[in-house]
Amino acid sequence: MKQTNKKTAAAKPAQKTTISVIKADIGGYVGHSSSHPDVIELAKSMLGKAKQNKTIVDFCVTNCGDDLELIMTHRKGCDSKEIHGLAWKVFEAGTELAKKLKLYGAGQDMLADAFSGNVKGMGPGVAEMEIVERKSEPIIVFMGDKCAPGAWNFPLFKMFADPFNTIGLIIDPSMHDGFVFEVHDIKKDKNFKLSTPEEMYDLLVLIGSAENYIIKAVYTKKGEIAASSSTQKLYLIAGKYVGKDDPVLIVRGQSGLPAMGEILEPFAFPHLVTGWMRGSHYGPLMPTAQKQANPSRFDGPPRVIAAGFQVSDGKLIGPRDMFDDPSFDYARIQANQMANFMRQHGPFEPHRLPLAEMEYTTLPEVLKKLQSRMK
């Protein structure tokens, strides 16, 4: 019998989906408390057109306090000039509308006059990841207001390295080897990768100083992305205090990664973060439903919201408001109690930030004024 050689077709590379979360404070309504509905609708309209012309696959526009949040999926990879340019155009148009409405601090996160290919270093915060979608792809996008990027250090450690929070680290064979944390030294612009559990103590030495070392990303031991955060600090870009940093974070869950409940659990404790009024105070990070993310008491206390999605062929199935849940009521009560305690300190530390973190505020000017009187 004559045998024929059949050439097997080369397997096509799996299609990748990029999730980009880009945010900016382009004008507060009223003061720093929220975002104006017209600005949000303008952003939705512009991203809707971008979806129609296939620049992006899908999108969701929301706000956390006075920050406009653009959640987009596309096929163009991280750091795409086209996607970052789209976000910049949305923020520019939103800034013009904010100026017409005389919103407070219109365009305050727009630190450059013109787009130069990437919004990183230009003011807006960015978290991105490129993934091959699994059979089921649940993600949570966390968005903070009145807090600094280091706000994610504590919850990310709890999610991916603390077995008291994430039982999967012990009983799920696919998680038992632990994870790899990418840490940025934001003052010296250096990166570290530390593996847990074997380098857990070294990791904690760094990330316990959340104003200096920030978790940028978390990976499986096989190198698959599990979480990605924004690490931009505005005062390091602008050289002066220009507003809060209000970070964003994307976390994938399930199937070898922490379960949704394990990802949310760290926020049941409203840990202290830097930010709050004028970005110069410590306060509790309060988990709230999106409709409650309008901080007004002393411009706070700091807030975090969680938008859950199922990603399906690039489409965002959602959002589901993950903190719109009575099981987080006690965390909100505790946050208010902690806020009361911290506020009683007034301008004294530890409510006000230590001097090293006040160097971009009015403190240098005060010291300069007193220079001639120093003995």
Image (spheres, grey):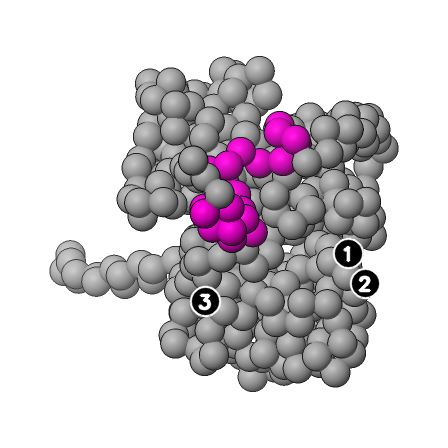
Residue 338: x and y in percent read 75, 27
| Mark 1: secondary structure | loop
**Amino acid on which the number 2 mark rests in the picture:** Val
Spatial separation of the CA atoms under disc 2 and disc 1: 6 Å
- The tag earlier along the polypeptide, 2 or 3, is 2
Which quadrant would the N terminus be assigned to in this image? bottom left
Residue shown at the point (77%, 45%) measured from the top left: 298
Residue shown at the point (38%, 74%) measured from the top left: 117
Task: In this rendered view, identify the residue nearer to me: 65 or 370.
Answer: 370
**Amino acid on which the number 1 mark rests in the picture:** Ser
Task: In this rendered view, identify the residue nearer to me: 262 or 182.
Answer: 182
Q: Is residue 208 left or right of residue 191?
A: right
Magenta stretch, residue numbers:
348-372
Decide: is 136 above or below 103. above
Residue sitting farthest toward the left: 2
Which quadrant would the C terminus be assigned to in this image? top left
| Mark 2: secondary structure | loop
Label 2, on which residue?
30
Spatial separation of the CA atoms under disc 2 and disc 3: 25 Å
Mark 1: few/some/many CA within 10 Å (<14, 14-19, 20+): many
Q: Is residue 335 left or right of residue 363?
A: right
Label 1, on which residue?
33
Q: Is residue 158 left or right of residue 44?
A: left
Residue 309: x and y in percent read 65, 51
Q: Which mark is residue 122?
A: 3
- As for residue 368 lying within the magenta part, the answer is yes
